[in-house]
Image (tube, rainbow, N blue to C red):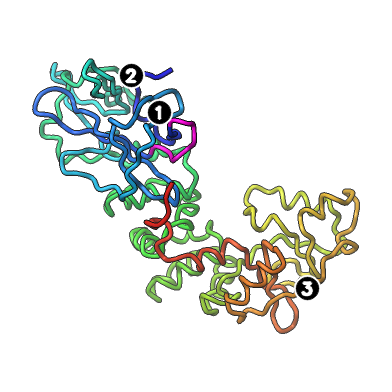
Amino acid sequence: MSATRVFIARLAGCGVFDPVGDRVGKVIDVLVAYQSHGAPRTTGMLVEITGRRRVFVPIARVTSIAPGQVITNGLVDLRRFTQRGQEVRVIAELLGRKVIMRDGSGNATIEDLAIERNDKKDWIVSELFLRRPKTSAALFSRGQTLFADWSQVSEENESEESQSAEQLIATFSEMLPADLASALLDLPDERMLEVAEELDDERLADVLEELPEEEQIEIVQDLDDQRAAEVLDLMQPDDAADLMQNLPEERAEAILELMDEEEAEDLRRLMQFDELTAGGLMTTEPVICSADATVAEAMALVRRKEVAPALAASVFVTLPPHETPTGKYLGMVHFQRLLRYPPHERLGTILDTDVEPVGPETHISKIHRTLANYNLVALPVIDRENHLIGVVTVDDVLDHLLPDDWRTEDEGGI
């Protein structure tokens, strides 16, 4: 059943469907335009379609808004979205903005707003959900909430009041790192840096791994050395090394000095290789076991939350030590094979020794052919003494094979 009144923050991430029920994208934001009299009018929605492309869907083409979904008439203009001067993005620009109560009772912050369909079939801003500043020194006091009509508030003298980064982060809190990275790319540079500053270290590390090189550098350059070291410490070593190689040498060294000693050593080792070789692409933190380890022990390591999916697909078996650079490389055991054997089975008895490891100087052109030819997710990298020094995963290779602007690529369609 179609709603006639909708709160905007709840629309973020909702699926957008055509009349026959095929999904065409998801809602990123809603745009409203100020009018000379009365509340702002909704002009349309910013929708992300195939290929992470952002397009504008006029509100006239939205036939129904129901819980969790938006239905359109199927006509979508594939031209990239361009915001017009009189338009304001609700989630990116209005939520978190301060307003003045016209009754003289003070200021409040917009936490959400509702749009409602009127008799003329226009969607008009009908109600604001506001939060007053906290009046108590209590640790968990957040201030009183209230609903108000647009006519009860004023934005006078508030034009320079920026939306709080905290409010924007709260709106995007459920997004996957890749989607949050896309959302950051759509913000002005200053706002992007504000939001990045407010993200916790782990979330920022995940997002940095998904951003293009230029934005990565811009954000890290905006952080102090200590914060940069903590964030880079949490990134995948290969991604962190790529980023560090693009920083000024003095800055990179200052950050390395503040990092965990082992993590810094891993990064220094990776940074000595060319970016498009196995050494430059590899991660130094694969799942490594001894030949005497059991299937149950290997499965316990694979289950760890911090293990990336591509790395969880294989367990690598070596002689001690079992941290890169390891002892002699013996072979690998694919996750699917682990599932076929009893928990007490020793890994040494089920090794796959057919996959030929590559050296650190192996070029990406050979690596991606090897991954494709043998349907592999990860490829071991060894040094001249046959020690395992890292693993190249398919996602690392894809990042370099796709065009530089693949995150904002204009190609493709519905």
- Which residue shows up at 22% across the image and 38% down it? 88
Q: Mark 2 points at which residue?
A: 5
Give the residues in magenta: 19-27
Q: Give the Cα separation between the discs numbered 3 and 2.
A: 63 Å
Position of the N terminus, as image quadrant, is: top left
Quadrant of the rendered image containing residue 168: top left
Number of numbered tags placed on the structure image: 3
Q: Name the residue under label 3.
A: 329
- Which residue shows up at 88% across the image and 51% down it? 341
* 191 drawn magenta: no
Q: Which of marks 3 and 1 is nearer the N terminus?
A: 1
Q: Where is residue 227 in the image (x, y as percent from the top left)?
A: 42, 57
Describe residue 289's horizontal placement relative to residue 129 as left or right. right
The correct choice, above or below, for 172 with respect to 188 in the image is above
The reply to whether the C-beta atoms of the residues labelled 3 and 1 are less than 8 Å apart is no
Describe residue 276's horizontal placement relative to residue 323 as left or right. left
Q: What residue type is labelled 2?
A: Arg
Describe residue 130's horizontal placement relative to residue 390 as left or right. left
Q: What residue type is labelled 1?
A: Arg
Q: Mark 1 points at which residue?
A: 10
For this orientation, the residue located farthest to the left is 36
The reply to whether the C-beta atoms of the residues labelled 1 and 2 are less than 8 Å apart is no
Quadrant of the rendered image containing residue 364: bottom right
Is there any visible trace of residue 84 in the rendered image?
A: yes
Question: In what element is the residue under mark 3?
Answer: strand
Quadrant of the rendered image containing residue 268: bottom right
Q: Which of marks 1 and 2 is nearer the N terminus?
A: 2
Q: Few, some or many C-alpha atoms within 10 Å of disc 2 (few <14, some 14-19, many ≥20)?
A: some
